[in-house]
């Protein structure tokens, strides 16, 4: 995790700090660059996805045509094999209709609303056929795209929306500015083609205020709406004690905690947020965890913050700290929207004795701040090793990107415990039990506003889907590979993976099916459908995990029935079928013989006219 310092002019060299940090006067503002983390088979059955084999009631026969046809699925990811057999139609032609590569400089820059975006786009079949992958030795994006929209059915590992139009925005590293450009690109493509769109983002961000006010959340809220849906994974930090909410009683009250490593590395960051109208002060400490005491401390900030600041602490150059730790610490602070302090401590240091020493934090507030929050990055957790210290919690581990008002957030549950391997032996996942329960890693809220998150849960442990042919490193395509599909003289790997990265595209594919029925669905209507149809079994209703499920488990068939019966703009008379009676009713409405009803404006263009009648007729003909 790197901190990018955005400078008003060239910064002076960082000063070596002893016990009193100095400020870099030339700093204008700062922010984490936010490299976002990459957060199917049995999943289709678990989520009740119709794949052509299960019997349906006669009234449900119209749902047989729900394949995502006429809908754009946008995938923002890394490690995409653009011409994998799972992303091709029956003729072998790639169903990827457009590719945007923000890091590519060899093609044409996209132009959207007068803005020229960095990167290149490719939209002709010949251009896409020549593409290989955005990132060798990575399969994440191939797996998620196959889960959402894979169409190769012969091996049982297809996707939810096998006839959707796939637009891929792929890049080796996922940063917030590139995510923003990619969302704009996908929705612009859908607008040019006159299609509804759902964008899948199987990625997460620990940093941020977690209240929907971060720049990406604000963008998501401003750009999504009717027929423009965003889906984000909840994140895989549900088992980490990486969140520490705190209510300061007064200005002398002190929050004390120790930063512990979760994995083998000591690197990472801490992000601290006061609530609006409040400010905090940070002190970094050296903790002796064997003897449970604080040894050293360095004050980093003050309440009278009137200019953004950046400091570097070279521990090797400090006569006291160098006895215990080596490396650097970087600290930044600024006043955010709402007159609140946001501080970031980046850790690029480690103790000389990893069994005894850790970094800690002491935080105070300028007054009684009721809603202060501290988060640490994915490799760290917060522990209580000294007197008066507070440990972190799992609650509030939800990704910051999942805390906006419009994006649909997705958690993960266990759909299988093992997968077959190429040698015929099953590969077991010890923590995948019991089947049907919430996955141990699935993050949840509430967010900083107290709103429950995620919105819905879907199968996310363990899913088998397509892997990249250009990946010879990641376990999805190598040691855990379950199938090599031979076609067209090529060998296409398939492999298992788990995470909310895998559950999000199940929901994205389901929303594509919903948009096929009603291309004007809004995020609020999609949540309404989930409210009415989510599965609430004994796992969902268990008091131990009730906060983690959102509305419950995704039920695609029930959701499609609900859209057809209650949210179908073509079904004017709400009798569960789109037929000539709906045309007649709309004609009577236009002639003033019948009162207007919900969805009288069938095509959502703001007018009730003959175009709405044509829309119903086209729906009838497409289903005939």
Image (spheres, helix red, strand yellow):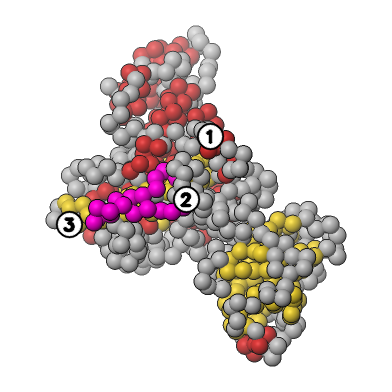
> Closer to the N terminus: mark 3 or mark 2?
3
Q: Can residue 200 be seen in this view?
A: no
- For the C terminus, the image quarter is top left
Crowd rating for badge 2 (residues with CA inside 10 Å; few <14, some 14–19, many 20+): many
Q: Is-magenta flag for residue 423?
A: yes
Q: 291 or 309, which is in the foreground?
A: 291
Q: Which residue bears the numbered disc 1?
A: 538
Nearer to us of marks 3 and 1 is 1
Identify the residue at horizontal 44%, vertical 60% (top origin). Answer: 117
Q: Marks 3 and 1, how far apart in space?
A: 45 Å
Q: Is residue 23 left or right of residue 490?
A: right
> Closer to the N terminus: mark 3 or mark 1?
3
Nearer to us of marks 3 and 2 is 2
Q: Is residue 507 visible?
A: yes
Q: Is residue 3 left or right of residue 179?
A: right
231 shown above or below 350: above
Looking at the image, the residue that sits furthest to the top is 593
Q: In this view, does 292 lie to the left or right of 576?
A: right
Q: Marks 3 and 2, how far apart in space?
A: 30 Å
Q: Which residue bears the numbered disc 2?
A: 500
Identify the residue at horizontal 58%, vertical 66% (top origin). Answer: 380
Q: Position of residue 6 (x, y in %)?
A: 59, 72
User: Could you tell me which secondary element the residue under label 3 belongs to?
Assistant: strand
Q: Which residue bears the numbered disc 3?
A: 490
Q: Marks 1 and 2, how far apart in space?
A: 21 Å
Is most of the magenta stretch helix, strand or loop? loop
């Amino acid at each position: 995790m790197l901190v990018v310092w955005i400078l008003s002019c060239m910064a002076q060299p960082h000063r070596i700090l002893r016990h009193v940090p100095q400020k870099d006067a030339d700093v204008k503002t700062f922010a984490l660059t936010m490299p976002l983390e990459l957060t199917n088979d049995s999943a289709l059955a678990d989520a009740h996805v119709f794949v052509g084999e299960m019997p349906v009631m006669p009234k449900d026969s119209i749902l047989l045509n729900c394949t995502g046809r006429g809908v754009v699925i946008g995938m923002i990811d890394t490690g995409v094999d653009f011409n994998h057999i799972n992303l091709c139609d029956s003729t072998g032609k790639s169903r990827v209709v457009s590719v945007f590569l923000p890091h590519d400089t060899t093609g044409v820059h996209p132009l959207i609303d007068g803005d020229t975006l960095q990167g290149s786009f490719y939209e002709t079949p010949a251009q896409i056929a020549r593409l290989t992958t955005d990132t060798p030795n990575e399969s994440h994006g191939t797996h998620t795209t196959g889960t959402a929209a894979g169409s190769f059915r012969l091996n049982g590992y297809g996707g939810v929306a096998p006839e959707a139009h796939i637009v891929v925005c792929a890049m080796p590293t996922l940063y917030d500015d590139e995510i923003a450009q990619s969302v704009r690109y996908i929705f612009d493509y859908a607008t040019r083609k006159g299609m509804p769109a759902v964008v899948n983002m199987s990625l997460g961000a620990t940093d941020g205020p977690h209240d929907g006010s971060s720049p990406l959340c604000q963008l998501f809220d401003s750009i999504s709406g009717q027929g423009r849906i965003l889906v984000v994974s909840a994140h895989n930090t549900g088992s980490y004690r990486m969140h520490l909410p705190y209510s300061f009683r007064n200005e002398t009250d002190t929050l004390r905690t120790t930063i512990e490593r979760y994995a083998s590395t000591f690197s990472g960051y801490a992000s601290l947020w006061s609530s609006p109208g409040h400010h905090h002060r940070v002190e970094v400490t050296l903790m002796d965890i064997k003897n449970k005491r604080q040894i050293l401390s360095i004050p980093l900030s003050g309440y009278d913050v009137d200019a953004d600041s950046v400091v570097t602490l070279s521990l090797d150059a400090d006569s006291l700290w160098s006895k215990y730790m080596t490396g650097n610490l970087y600290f930044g602070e600024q006043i955010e929207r709402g007159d609140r302090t946001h501080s970031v401590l980046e850790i690029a240091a480690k103790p000389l004795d990893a069994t005894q020493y850790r970094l800690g934090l002491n935080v105070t507030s300028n007054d009684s701040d009721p809603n202060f929050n501290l988060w640490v990055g994915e490799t760290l957790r917060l522990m209580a090793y000294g007197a008066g210290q507070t440990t972190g919690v799992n609650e509030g581990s939800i990704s910051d990107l999942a805390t906006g008002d419009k994006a649909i957030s997705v958690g993960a549950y266990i759909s299988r415990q093992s997968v077959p391997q190429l040698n015929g032996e099953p590969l077991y996942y010890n923590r995948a039990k019991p089947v049907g329960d919430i996955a141990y890693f699935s993050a949840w809220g509430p967010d900083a506003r107290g709103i429950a998150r995620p919105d819905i849960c879907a199968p996310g442990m363990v899913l088998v889907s397509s892997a990249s042919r250009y990946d010879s490193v990641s376990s999805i395509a190598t040691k855990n590979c379950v199938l090599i599909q031979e076609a067209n003289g090529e060998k296409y790997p398939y492999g298992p993976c788990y995470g909310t990265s895998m559950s999000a595209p199940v929901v994205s594919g389901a929303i594509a099916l919903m948009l096929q029925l009603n291309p004007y669905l809004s995020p609020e209507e999609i949540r309404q459908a989930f409210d009415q149809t989510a599965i609430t079994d004994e796992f969902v209703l268990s008091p131990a995990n009730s906060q983690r499920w959102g509305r419950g488990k995704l039920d695609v068939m029930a959701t499609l029935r609900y859209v057809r019966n209650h949210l179908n703009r073509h079904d004017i008379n709400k009798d569960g079928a789109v037929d000539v009676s709906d045309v007649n009713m709309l004609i009577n409405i236009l002639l003033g013989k019948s009162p207007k009803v919900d969805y009288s404006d069938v095509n959502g263009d703001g007018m009730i006219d003959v175009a709405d009648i044509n829309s119903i007729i086209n729906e009838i003909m497409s289903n005939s």
